[in-house]
Amino acid sequence: VSLTTEQLAEQFDKSVAQITWGITLVLMFRSVGSVVFGIAADRWGRKWPFVVNNILFIVLELGTGFCNTYKQFLACRALFGIAMGGLYGNAAATALEDCPEQARGIISETNSYIERAAARRAKGNVAGTFIAEGKVALRRHWLLLIYLVLLMAGFNFMSHGSQDLYPTMLKNQYNFSANAVTVTQVVANLGAMAGGTTVGYSKQDKVRHGRIPIDIIAASQIFGRRFSIIVTSFIGGVLLYPYSFTSSHSVMAAAFFEQFCVQGAWGVIPIHLMELSPGSFRTFVVGTSYQLGNLASSASSTIESTIGERFPLPPKGKVKRYGYGKVICIFMACVFVYVIILALVGPERLGRKFDVAHDSDMTEAAGRDAVAAAAHERGALGKADRDSCEDEKGNSTRTAVEVHA
């Protein structure tokens, strides 16, 4: 939608500011999806809620292209927001719960969920234990949950404030062609991918330089999550002027490095939220804090486009032009300052263990005996898996020897 605001405005006979409500509604309703699918994933497992969520996402995304009226467009985008909102928390939990600690920043059911399900069964009342876990998490971590929502509001303002109206700015204010806008967006997204991987990647690995092994440890694992966020946000703020005031195609370089910083800070967020969240409701807390932050920042593009229309430029034929760049620059400067302050005063739990043995909330809700039973069951399953792998490896080795003989 952000790439086609002017075309949609023409199709539905609306202003660009009115079309941006299609973006705003998606962001507003994402919190509904995060609650519904987050609770489902924490209660019944990650797999099937995620499958259903993706099917709805695909159907509603395709449906947007078949809307004939402005009201249909807004309704479809609102429903799409619900489907989109359920994806993030479940995807983060599924990807990161079983990930080795050294590899958490880059990236069947997770081992963490299996352990928690075993502890609930050992307690004897699965639903009652699940509710008890929620009460413990809310009593212990209510202030942290508020902080996470405020932090994610800042991050969502950062991403949507720098991205959603940017294609419109390039085309309307600086007269970029559709091809030039597309290429600029591709370059910006390449910067985003590079930033998210470089800053968020936290794997420690060895490579060889000649015969010399070298340890590679990336930013957020060396310097910590908060420091990485602060530094990338500061550099992103420095780059705002060329990002929003360069009228030639050289802006592609600024777009690359600006989105490198924006998504570099974002690359730290999945594991940072996972490490801070209560273990029993990790999917719900990660997804809901993110989507409530989205709700708070949902009007980013509408705010920018509405204020931008107060700075008219000489029209191009019948097309009205506005100084969106000035608004994006000032808006984003405020957002970067806000994120830096919140990261500076907030907590960090770098390298936190995700298993039930290290979860005091689960111990209080289910009892030590249930947690011990779950850990013992998981240990037995792990030993059986290792024995099975060793047997398969041994059989493969013997077969290879026999074939060679």
Image (tube, helix red, strand yellow):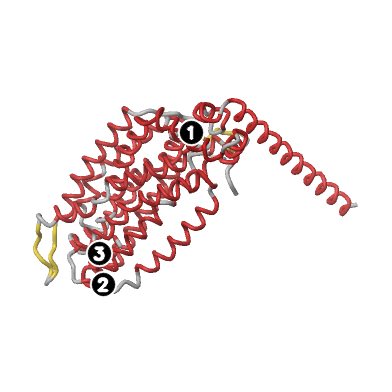
Q: Which image quarter is the N terminus in?
A: bottom left
Contact (Cβ within 8 Å) of mark 2 with mark 3: no
Q: Position of residue 375 (x, y in %)?
A: 63, 31
- Give the numbered dot on residue 5: 3
| Residue 230 makes an appearance in the image | no
Q: Identity of the amino acid at label 2?
A: Thr
Q: Which residue is mark 1?
A: 132
Residue lying at 46% horizontally and 33% vertically, measured from the top left: 278
Give 324 or 130, whichever is nearer the viewer: 130
Corner quadrant of residue 349: top left
Q: Identity of the amino acid at label 3?
A: Thr
Q: Position of residue 281 (x, y in %)?
A: 47, 38
The residues tagged by marks 2 and 1 sit, at their Cα atoms, a distance apart of 47 Å
- Left or right of 63? Residue 165 is left
Q: Which residue is mark 2?
A: 69
Using a 10 Å C-alpha cutoff, classify the residue at mark 3 as few (fewer than 14 neighbours), some (14 to 19) or many (20 or more). Answer: many
Query: Which is nearer the N-term, disc 3 or disc 1?
Result: 3
Badge 2 element:
loop
Badge 3 element:
helix
Residue lying at 10% horizontally and 55% vertically, measured from the top left: 311
Q: Nearer the viewer, mark 3 or mark 1?
A: 1
Q: Nearer the viewer, mark 2 or mark 3?
A: 2
